[in-house]
Amino acid sequence: MVECNRVKNQTRNACHGSDSLASAERETEFFFGAGSSSSRGLQVPAEFDNCTLCLVKPYTMTQGLLGRVARDIVQAGFDISAMQMYHLDKSTAEEFLEVYRGVVAEYPEMVSELCSGACVAMALIHQHGGACVEQFRQFVGPADPEIARHLRPSTLRAKYGHNKLKNAVHCTDLADDGMLEVEYFFKILQ
């Protein structure tokens, strides 16, 4: 009988998991520099050709859903070419969401949500090419998770969103903005 690779003692375990919220925050800061909008985390160059942005919102992070969201994205045929954790201040959140000012009534609340805690930016490309921004927007679903649950229950917002402001993720809306949004997080903020 072949024995599985079992952990024999605590000093040779295969992975680490934080033992408390305080430890998680300290360890996240150590590895990803979550205390500022620019991070000292692992620097991997993002793909900027035919790309889109997925920004996992603070609500989703506090619910512990980052892993599930990332898993679903990969299973849907997208590659994550870069991933970085940020704490956005109000002015940075306002700058990023500027296109919604005066267009979306919830703009002030959108800004508040985005700077309320840690968020994770992912630069995505589709494994099979095509219109990456449009394909990802379809996969994310309608902005309102209630509508998404009725019309497209397998989308990210239907599965992980709470309400229109805490709707799991931000995704790029327009094809022309995919590279701009990815560059904002993976060039300008770094």
Image: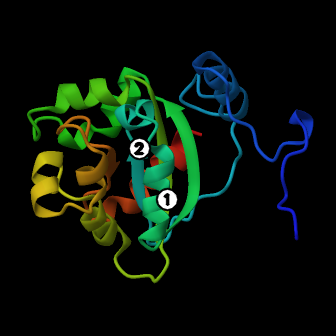
Position of 142 compared to 38: left or right? Answer: left
Quarter of the view holding residue 81: bottom right
Q: Quadrant of the C terminus?
A: top right
Q: Secondary structure at mark 1?
A: helix
Q: Which mark is residue 71?
A: 1
Q: Amino acid at mark 1?
A: Arg
Q: Secondary structure at mark 2?
A: strand
Q: Position of residue 124 (x, y in %)?
A: 47, 63
Q: CA distance from mark 2 to mark 1?
A: 13 Å
Between disc 2 and disc 1, the foreground one is 1
Position of 34 compared to 171: left or right? Answer: right
Q: How would you rate the neighbour count of disc 1 (Cα within 10 Å): few for under 14, some for 14-19, many for 20 or more?
A: few
Q: Position of residue 113 (x, y in %)?
A: 30, 27
Q: Amino acid at mark 2?
A: Val
Q: How would you rate the neighbour count of disc 2 (Cα within 10 Å): few for under 14, some for 14-19, many for 20 or more?
A: many
The count of marks equals: 2
Q: Residue furthest front?
A: 1
Q: Quadrant of the N terminus?
A: bottom right
- Residue at which label 2 appears: 56
Residue 144 appears in the figure: no
